[in-house]
Amino acid sequence: MGWQRDPERPDPAEPSRQKLRETLVERQIREAMEDGRFDALPHQGQRLPLEDDSLAGDRAMAHRLLKNAGVAPAWIEADKAARALLDERDRLLARAPRLSPLGRSQARAEMARLIDAANRAIVRVNIEAPTDRQQRRLLDRDVELARFERAARGEPPD
């Protein structure tokens, strides 16, 4: 009898699945390089920027996963909503001197609505924020409406 191959060992004449897989991946990379698909990547020729997760502590991995998925923690999303409402309030204050009496009345009602919505968003931020450093102070409705009235008269709102 001649030499027989041990069926428990891989046949050296047959390429392994791992080699085929690596060859396929390498071929795809080579083709992508030849097509120039790697030419316009960010940070090309530079070190990749390191992200500082030191403040996240034991939640760093979760924050990184959320960020890579395009999602932020709930308190950050709530803070974005609060900031958007505060920006809208500031735009309304800037527009106030140019409003007609009817427009001023409607804008005052809109200002009251914005203050209430901003306060709801701020409460959500304050509940969900991990520390008190990320919390915001609630708006005083009377103070904000008085700012609007000053702005509407052409006076500085602050």
Image (spheres, helix red, strand yellow):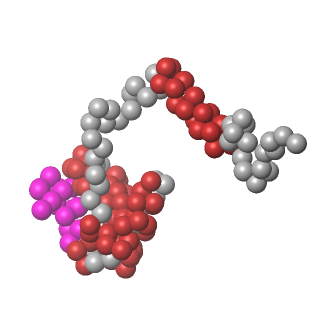
Name the image quarter holding the N terminus. Answer: top right
Q: Which residues are magenta?
A: 138-158
Q: Residue at x 34, y 52 (%)?
A: 103
Quadrant of res 104: bottom left
Give whichever of 8, 93 is nearer the camera: 8
Q: Residue at x 76, y 54 (%)?
A: 8
The percent position of residue 71, horizontal first and vertical second, equals 46, 58
Residue 55 seen anywhere in this rendered image of the structure: yes
Give whichever of 99, 54 is nearer the camera: 54
Q: Is residue 49 above or below residue 106?
A: above
Please say whether residue 79 is one of the residues in the magenta stretch.
no
Q: Residue at x 48, y 54 (%)?
A: 69
Q: Residue reaching furthest front?
A: 1
Give whichever of 68, 90 is nearer the camera: 68
Q: Residue at x 51, y 26 (%)?
A: 30
Please say whether residue 153 is one of the residues in the magenta stretch.
yes
Name the image quarter holding the C terminus. Answer: bottom left
Q: Is residue 27 above or below residue 107?
A: above
The percent position of residue 60, horizontal first and vertical second, equals 36, 67
Give whichever of 131, 28 is nearer the camera: 28
Residue 118 seen anywhere in this rendered image of the structure: no
The percent position of residue 52, horizontal first and vertical second, equals 27, 59
Q: Is residue 34 left or right of residue 64?
A: right
The percent position of residue 145, horizontal first and vertical second, equals 25, 67
